Amino acid sequence: MARKANVGDLFNVARVLNELDVKSDIVSICEGTGTTQEKGFDVIFNILNKASQKDVEKRIYDVLSGPFEMTAQEVEKVDIDTLIQLCEQCFTLKTLINFIKRVSN
């Protein structure tokens, strides 16, 4: 069971996303057409794609370990369905995106 993300978690997410240089991609996706769920998948895929290119996978595990209330090593082994459920418990996509837009300006 995960907890709701707190301010510290959001700043950790923002730091990783800035490192990945995905702010403009996220804003573009969110301003485009599609459902919130479709936009969410596009944002997640974009982040995963850039993370694999920039070798920050371990930092993402560290960031998620806080709200998921598990170690980074446990996060790495979570199956995809559980990952989606944990993310839904911790983060509201709309809130996260609005936060990223504001702290990145």
Image: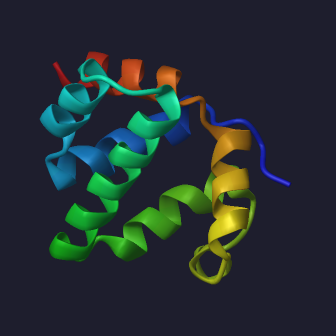
Residue beneath the point at 62% across and 70% down: 80
Q: Position of residue 97 (x, y in %)?
A: 39, 26
> In the rendered image of this protein, does residue 90 appear above or below residue 97?
below
Residue 73 drawn above or below residue 89: below
Toward the viewer: 50 or 80?
80
Query: Which residue is the extreme one toward the right?
Result: 1
| Left or right, 46 with reference to 54 | right
* Count of numbered circles on the image: 0
Looking at the image, residue 35 sits to the left or right of residue 73; the answer is left
For image coordinates 30% across by 23% down, the residue present is: 33
Query: Within the image, what quadrant is residue 59 found in?
Result: bottom left
**56 lies left or right of 41:** left
The N terminus sits in image quarter = bottom right
Residue 46, placed above or below residue 10: below
Identify the residue at the far front of this view. 34
x, y percent for residue 20: 19, 54
Q: Position of residue 68 (x, y in %)?
A: 70, 56
42 or 69, which lies in front?
A: 42
Query: Which quadrant holds the C terminus?
Result: top left
On the picture, is 61 further left or further right than 89?
left
Instruction: State the image quarter where residue 46 is shown.
Output: bottom left
In this picture the colour scheme is rainbow
- Residue 4 lies, in percent from the top left, at 72, 36
Residue at 19% over, 44% down: 22
Measuring 34% from the left and 57% from the top, which residue is drawn there?
A: 45
